[in-house]
Image (tube, coloured by chain):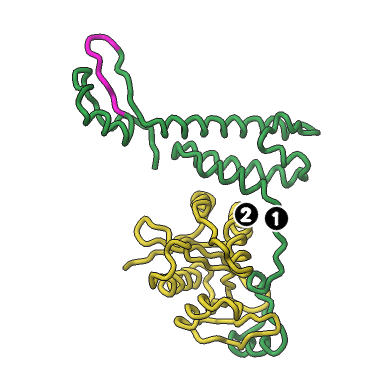
Amino acid sequence: MRMLTGPIASFSKSHLRDPKVVATASQGLVEIRLGGDADPVGMLPMRMIREQQEVHALAQTFIRAMVALRQEKPSPVLLGEVAYVADWSRDEQDRFLDGFAEAMAESLRMNDPAPARFYVKLMSIPDSEYRSPQFTGNVTGASADIIDAKVGLRR
Amino acid sequence: MSLTATALTRRNVHQVSAIERTANAPWWAQEVETFLLVDAPKQILSRTGSGLLVHEGDVLVAVAAHRPHHKWTAELLQAFLVLPALRNKGLAALALLCALAHVHVAAKTEHVMWLVHQENTAMLRVSLSVADPATPADADGFVTFAKP
């Protein structure tokens, strides 16, 4: 969970030489009080900033996709990294946006780009067309009769 | 050791993206991995399939996909994968039992079926430790297991 809901610790400016300040800040947002009327400043891991930036970028992608997919001929430029949906059917595009909205909501809730990033990447991969029995449950020949007897009623 | 299974949902399906493919995997393992890393998550996202994650504490141990069988009144465990880094640690049979128990409850079904290719000796060994084979290998080389 990567929440930026508030500082995990607060130090005064005079503590800045204390290694504990940086050690704590590597775990999350740390408030540094500057004294007087000055607004406090924050220290946080760069990882959190990069994740925040990626969440923002994905949110922009989502908004652009919403706008683009309302047009009769969606612009691949506007769609950006989800341009692969431009040729999908209207129904598929609606379902894409529906899933993207849910993944985006989860990313924003957790302040973690992973759910939306995974969704965008996964949807860009063409569907496989597996016919392997292990995925369909198809069995051949006498095995079907044996399973009939073992499992019971057919549907 | 305590394993728990939770349903794959739109909220947690991104966790499968952390699974690394097996290096130099045989064809049947590549198929299962692709199915679980691509097709099954798509089914979850489009609400056309079901799946589960098996954890030991916070550590993801295994992932599986399942759906109702089109012919028999049973749930088909389509694919089951123990994470490559956790293999050969005696976890697979427990994880499979945990997955089967979850599927029984989630699908409200009397039987769970799964097919294992006869070349997949690791999964055959694990399957034989939790159930008897329902059939010998069929013409495609798949052995069927059915666990009440």
**Looking at the image, which residue is at 69% across and 77% down?**
A138
Q: Residue furthest top?
A: A37
Q: Quadrant of residue B98?
A: bottom left
Query: Is residue A34 magenta-colored?
Result: yes
Q: Residues within 10 Å of mark 1 (few under 14, many from 20)?
A: few
Q: Is residue B14 above or below residue B143?
A: above
Chain B, colour shown: yellow
Question: Mark on residue A24?
Answer: none
Please name the amino acid that badge 1 sits on: Asp
Chain A, colour shown: green
Mark 2–mark 1 CB contact (< 8 Å) = yes
Q: Nearer the viewer, residue B76 or A132?
A: A132
Q: Is residue B82 above or below residue A120?
A: below
Query: Is residue A85 magenta-colored?
Result: no
Q: Is residue A15 above or below residue A154?
A: above
Please name the amino acid that badge 2 sits on: Lys
In the image, the segment drawn in magenta is: A30-38
Question: Mark on residue B42?
Answer: 2
Q: Quadrant of residue B139?
A: bottom right
Name the spot of residue B99 as percent of width and height, x first: 47, 69
Name the spot of residue A121 as percent of width and height, x first: 61, 45
Q: Secondary structure at mark 2?
A: helix
Q: Nearer the viewer, residue B31 or B62?
A: B31
User: Disc 1 designates what residue?
Assistant: A127
B25 sits left or right of A145 in the view: left
A29 sits left or right of A82 in the view: left
Q: Residue furthest front?
A: B24
